[in-house]
Image (cartoon, rainbow, N blue to C red):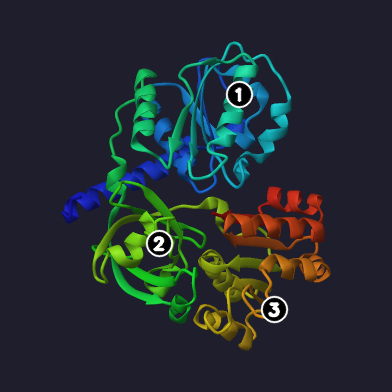
Amino acid sequence: MTTDPQRWALAGALLLIWLAASAWWLRPARRMAVSRDAMLILYASQTGQALELAQMALRRLLEGAQDAVAMPLGQATVEQIAACRQLLIVAATTGIGEPPDDARAFVPRMAERPDLSGVRHAVLALGDRKYEDFCSFGRRVDAWLTDCGAKALHDRIEADDLDRESLAAWDRLLDALGAEDAKVPAETLHRPWRIATRELLNPSSQDEARVPGLWRIELQPEEGDLPAWLAGDLFEIVTPGGHRRDYSIASLPEEGGVTLLVREVHGKDGRMGEGSGLLVEGTPVEGAVSARLRDHAAFHAPSGEGPLLLIAAGSGLAGIRPHAIEAMRVGRPVWMILGERRPDLDARVSAEVKDWQADGRLARLDLAYSRLGGGQGRYVQHVVAAEAGAVADWLGHDGAIMLCGGLAMGKDVEAALETALGRAWIDEARGDGRYHADLY
């Protein structure tokens, strides 16, 4: 990777041009008719990876003088799909084999069986083989298209953790469709970030079996000014093995650095995972990792001005902390439910939010500790279930929910919220942008 400031400036300028152009290229296509000769690109994106790949495909096709338009899958109508000549879909899977939030509206349309025999299609499905429902949603969309008579431009491409071979196959397909060569390689979007500080927040828990450490890590760009980002955005690192790992940014730009909360992940052999291992022990303080900031629109601030319910456990605090700060700053009422293991071992994790409560900045704080003795342990979902009436009263008709943490926790919390609020409330809030979940 180059460290030439002029090359970084050029790469940055090209990126800004590309992002500005993307805002035009990804204009609201649902208000436009899709011509028969057009190539329609649809994306289903949760963390932004599918969106980014769709943007890249659109840019390359337009630069190759192809007639192309892109939009979220959830905004596409069956009529628009039937009207296009060629269809490209980039589809991620989230949760337990579920569609990303921006594609949920399309699921009921898949109950229809329109005649798509005039459409040729290709699907790039994104997933991770460590999950049982690998590429499940992309497979469902591909199967639906085939059932409706669409003909394949290419066999479905399934990318495991954005593996290079699968993405190379996708690039070759774009080449065959007349796309221009990429002007800005993806590698130029990453740059060295220096680990400025690293602090173990639960050091005493190292004496307790099977309890991984939680680290607070601050990073600074090795060159140039600190870039801007929004609450909810992600910090993407590249591991020595070439894999990408996303971490919620726990800080805001005015705090002077990118702060991460990284939980140690250990495999069956006891070795630390690629991402946490690189950040926790593989890179010394003052050493650098290859990384970039990544837009995560699906977890940006919720819409409206109603009361806010923030729910997180463990490292999920990183995802909701910036939202809490922004909401408290503008006087939006905030109720936080935070889960950890034990109050003695994890006191430093919750110290800041306790200060917020003491200062009157948080309207309410509930701490759930899962490893209390005497059968007193509880998880955040237990708090939601026990306080169902209070949750419904707090949120009313215009409240918002943000949920961040592990997948299993998230599913249990969502079930408790559905009991407290009803499925109709959750569906309406999700559609209005008042319900965001970032689960991993």
Q: Please say if 66 is above or below 417.
A: above
The earlier-in-sequence mark between 3 and 1 is 1
CA–CA distance in space, label 2 to label 3: 30 Å
Decide which of 176, 276 is in the foreground and name it: 276
User: Can you identify the residue that label 3 sits on?
Assistant: 364
Residue 290's place in the image compared with 70, above or below, is below
**Pick the front one: 211 or 184:** 211
Q: Residues within 10 Å of mark 1 (few under 14, many from 20)?
A: some
Image x and y of residue 158, in percent: 46, 32
Q: Which residue is mark 1?
A: 143
Q: Amino acid at mark 1?
A: Ala
Residue at mark 2: 228
What amino acid is at disc 3? Arg
Q: Is residue 361 visible to us here? A: yes
The part of the image, by quadrant, that contains residue 435 is bottom right
Residue 220 is at least partly visible in this image: no
Residue 383: quarter of image: bottom right
Q: Secondary structure at mark 2?
A: loop
| Left or right for 353, reference 182 | right
294 displayed left or right of 437: left
Q: Position of residue 137 (x, y in %)?
A: 59, 35
* Residue 259, percent from left and from top: 41, 69
Residue extending furthest toward the bottom: 358
